[in-house]
C-alpha cells in the first residue's frame, strides 16, 4: 500500500506509542475515535486499523513520526468505504489533515479501485467538515439529532465523494 502526494505513509505497528500519546493528550475529542488508554490498547488499535477491511495511513509532519491518521474501512461488495481521520492536538490548525485526507482519498478512488467514499461529522466539529471539503467530499445530508453528547442531541453532517466527481 503506497500513497503519493501527501504528508502520509502507511500506518505500522511501531506507531502505537504515537497513537497512545494522541489519544491520552486529548481524551475529550479522541474518545469518539476509539478506546486507547494504554500501550496494549494502542497496539490493538493499530492492528485493527491495518487488518481486514481497514486501511490506514499515518499523517507525518516534520519527520517520519506519526502525528495523526487517515483511514478507511472498505465495503468490498459495493466498492465503497467509510473514511475517517484524526490528528494529535499539538499539530492541528496547519492544514495537515486536509492535505493528508486529500492524498488518501485521491489514492482510494484511483489506484485503490473504490467508487465511493463516505464520512460523517458532528455539526459542532466544523474543523472536520473543513477537512472533508478540502479532500473533495460534498455534503449529502444531515442526520438530525443522531448522537447524544453530554446530554445534548447533536446533528451529524454526511458527506460523500465519488470516483466520478
Ligand atoms: C478534525 C481534525 C482532524 C482537524 O485536523 P486539522 O489538521 O487541525 O485540520 P486542518 O488544519 O486541515 O483544518 C481543516 C479546516 O478546519 C478549519 N478549522 C480548524 N480548526 C477549527 C476550529 N476549531 N473551528 C472551526 N474551523 C476550524 C480550518 O480553518 C480548515 O478550514 P479551511 O480548509 O476552510 O481553511 C482535528 O481537529 C482532530 O483530530 N479532531 C479530533 C478527532 C476528530 O474530530 N476527527 C474527525 C471525526 S469526524
Image (spheres, rainbow, N blue to C red):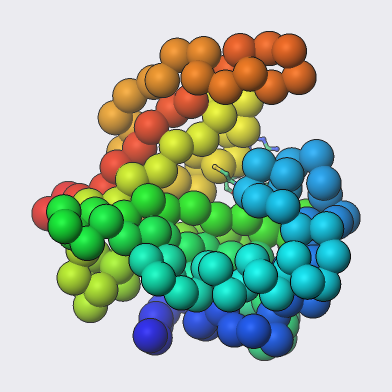
Q: Above or below — where is 26 with respect to 148?
A: below
Residue 91 is left or right of residue 143, and the answer is: right
Of residue 84 and residue 75, the one placed in the foreground of this image is 75
* Tally of marks: 0
Image point 39% across, 59% down: which residue?
Answer: 73
Q: Above or below — where is 22 with respect to 159?
A: below
Of residue 114 and residue 60, the one placed in the foreground of this image is 114
Image point 85% across, 65% down: which residue?
Answer: 38
Of residue 163 and residue 144, the one placed in the foreground of this image is 144
Residue 37 is left or right of residue 139, and the answer is: right
Residue 18 visible in this rendered orientation of the protein: no
Q: Above or below — where is 13 with respect to 88?
A: below
How far across and how far down the image is residue 59, in percent?
60, 72
Q: Residue furthest left?
A: 164
Residue 80 is left or right of residue 36, and the answer is: left
- In which quarter of the view is residue 91 placed? bottom right
Image point 46% across, 74% down: which residue?
Answer: 51
How far across and how far down the image is residue 138, in percent?
31, 38
How far across and how far down the image is residue 68, in percent?
65, 66
Residue 103 is left or right of residue 59, and the answer is: left
Residue 140 visible in this rendered orientation of the protein: yes
Image point 43% across, 66% down: which residue?
Answer: 54
How far across and how far down the image is residue 6, in percent?
47, 75
Amino acid at each position: 500500500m503506497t500513497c503519493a502526494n501527501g504528508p502520509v505513509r502507511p500506518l505500522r505497528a511501531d506507531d502505537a506509542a504515537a497513537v497512545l500519546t494522541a489519544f491520552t493528550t486529548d481524551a475529550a475529542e479522541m474518545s469518539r475515535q476509539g478506546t486507547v488508554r494504554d500501550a496494549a490498547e494502542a497496539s490493538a488499535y493499530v492492528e485493527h486499523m491495518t487488518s481486514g477491511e481497514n486501511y490506514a495511513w499515518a499523517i507525518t509532519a516534520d519527520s517520519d513520526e506519526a502525528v495523526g491518521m487517515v483511514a478507511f474501512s472498505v465495503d468490498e461488495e459495493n466498492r465503497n468505504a467509510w473514511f475517517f481521520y484524526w490528528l494529535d492536538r499539538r499539530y492541528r490548525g496547519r492544514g495537515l489533515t486536509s492535505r493528508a485526507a486529500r492524498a488518501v482519498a485521491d489514492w482510494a478512488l484511483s489506484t485503490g479501485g473504490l467508487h465511493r467514499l463516505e464520512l460523517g461529522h458532528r455539526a459542532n466539529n466544523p474543523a472536520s467538515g473543513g477537512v472533508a471539503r478540502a479532500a473533495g467530499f460534498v455534503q449529502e445530508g444531515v442526520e438530525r439529532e443522531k448522537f447524544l453528547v453530554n446530554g445534548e442531541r447533536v446533528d451529524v453532517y454526511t458527506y460523500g465523494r465519488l470516483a466520478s466527481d
